[in-house]
Amino acid sequence: MALEPHLIKLDLKGDERGSLIALEALRNVPFAIKRTYFIFGTLPGVRRGKHAHRRLRQLAVCVHGGCKIALDDGRSQATVELKSPDMALYVPPMLWHEMFDFSEGCVLLVLAEDHYDERDYIRNYEQFLLSVRK
């Protein structure tokens, strides 16, 4: 069974030279990482995501700027704001998610436990609700 969505506090290291945050599979990332991508240059008013995954687990981190992520499990909804690179959002399977309200210059890094597979996506919200209720 997948864990519920939750925030993960990342260990921030640094000194007078600057800061560093390490993302490590099966340590502060709760799965082995097979794919990494980042979203940037998002125009004002644009919503990204707007889908769920059947099996894929992901971890999202705003490495620069901030954004909000709307989460929906088919029964309840919540919105999480990511605005610091030392906070990550764990996104389990079967969770509809939409990213929005990107700050200027926002870079959202996403770590995924598997390679891209279009068959894993549910892109229609009504189909998602039917799948959740089964």
Image: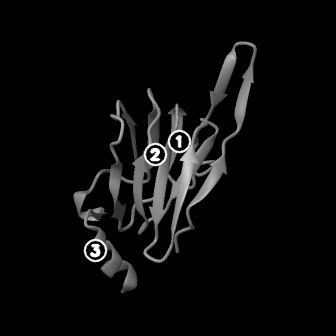
Point 52% across, 75% down: residue:
1
Residue found farthest to the bottom:
134
Point 53% across, 41% down: residue:
61
Closer to the N terminus: mark 1 or mark 2?
1
Q: How crowded is mark 1: few (under 14 residues within 10 Å), some or many (20 or more)?
A: many
Q: How crowded is mark 3: few (under 14 residues within 10 Å), some or many (20 or more)?
A: few
Q: Are marks 1 and 2 in contact (CB under 8 Å)?
A: yes
Residue found farthest to the top:
17
Confirm whether residue 58 shows in the render: no
Q: In which quarter of the image is the C terminus?
A: bottom left
Residue found farthest to the front:
45
In the image, taking residue 74 as reference, residue 48 lies left or right, namely: left
Residue 22 figure quarter: top right
**Which mark, residue 111?**
2
- Measure the C-alpha gap from mark 1 to mark 2: 9 Å
**132 over 40 or under it: above or below:** below
Whole-percent x, y for residue 23 in the image: 58, 39
Q: Mark 1 points at which residue?
A: 61
**38 over 20 or under it: above or below:** below
- Measure the C-alpha gap from mark 3 to mark 2: 27 Å
The residue mark sitting in front, 1 or 2, is 1
Query: Which residue is nearer to you in this view: 126 or 86?
Result: 126
Whole-percent x, y for residue 6 in the image: 60, 59
Whole-percent x, y for residue 52 in the image: 36, 63
Q: Mark 3 is on which residue type?
A: Glu
Q: Mark 1 is on which residue type?
A: Val
**Which mark, residue 81?**
none
Disc 2 element = strand
Closer to the N terminus: mark 3 or mark 2?
2
Query: Which residue is nearer to you in this view: 25 or 66?
Result: 66
Q: Mark 3 points at which residue?
A: 126
Q: How crowded is mark 2: few (under 14 residues within 10 Å), some or many (20 or more)?
A: many
